[in-house]
Image: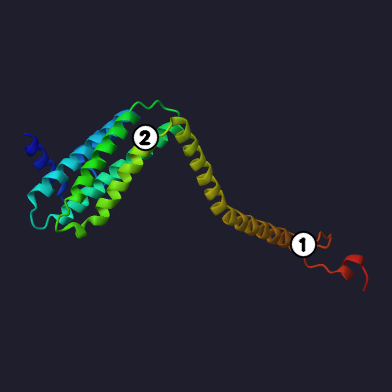
Amino acid sequence: MRLLALAALLAAIALPARAQTDFLTDDEADQIRLAQEPNMRIGLYLGFARQRADLLDQLFAQNKAGRSSTIHNFLEQLTQMMETVDVVIDDALKHQKELTALPDVAKTARSLHARLEKLRASDPPDLARFRFALDTAIDTLSDSADMAEEDLRDRIRGVETKEVELRKQRESLATPSSVEEARKAAEKKSAQQKSEKDSKAKKRPTLIRKGETLDSKSGKP
């Protein structure tokens, strides 16, 4: 039954590009949308990552021709899932939500890291075709495990520091634009004031009616 489930998942992932994120199947994306609570969402991503590792074990064991692109895709999907887990954790910490899934994150990341290390050590003949994706996945799993095992107070401070840095970057990027917009607004206002001043100068008030001249008005010949 397990092999059948993996085969079904393999077939689903092999379908053409989908509308949702490219590292999830349709069913997985639906599950994520329904799981708004961070611990539930983290649990789902970890389960999907373990499934990808099962599929990788299956592909490595079969050693079929043309498998390298599929292995590459699964490795990238696993990497993106673990990166997303880290984003969900940081977001939960930023909003001061309770996190109970961190031990499972550390345990799963360590386990998957060991499995991928074992696959790399097997030195398959087509390793060069997906080595970069494999190395990236291994590094990501190691980082995820380290962060999950990190003292929460340190991680919260890290999240806060990152937010401050991002805010400064946004402000620094926005400053030149804001200055330029203010300059243009000032120039426009100055031009409008000058135009109004010139218009008033041309339209000075007078008691002379239309068709009359200054001489006719005074009665002089």
Q: Position of residue 93 (x, y in %)?
A: 43, 32
Residue at horizontal 92%, vertical 66%? 218
Q: Nearer the viewer, residue 116 or 71?
A: 116
Left or right: 153 in relation to 217:
left
Query: Which label sits in the foreground, 2 or 1?
Result: 2
Quarter that holds the C terminus: bottom right
Left or right: 103 in relation to 123:
right
- Is residue 42 visible in the rendered image? The answer is no
Which amino acid, by three-letter code, is at mark 2?
A: Ala
Quarter that holds the N terminus: top left
Q: Which residue is mark 1?
A: 203
Q: Secondary structure at mark 2?
A: helix
Q: Nearer the viewer, residue 29 or 179?
A: 29
Q: Which residue is mark 2?
A: 148
As measured in the structure, the alpha-carbon distance from the residue carrying label 2 to the one carrying label 1 is 76 Å
Q: Secondary structure at mark 1?
A: loop
Q: Earlier in the sequence, mark 2 or mark 1?
A: 2
Residue at horizontal 17%, vertical 54%? 123
Q: Position of residue 151 (x, y in %)?
A: 43, 31
Please determine whether, in this image, residue 207 is positioned above or below residue 99: below
Please determine whether, in this image, residue 215 is positioned above or below residue 194: below
Which amino acid, by three-letter code, is at mark 1?
A: Lys
Disc sitting over residue 31 in the figure: none
Residue at horizontal 50%, vertical 46%? 166
Number of numbered tags placed on the structure image: 2
Label 1 CA crowd tier, 10 Å (few <14, some 14–19, many 20+): few
Left or right: 206 in relation to 87:
right
Q: Quadrant of residue 42?
A: top left
Q: Nearer the viewer, residue 210 or 187?
A: 187
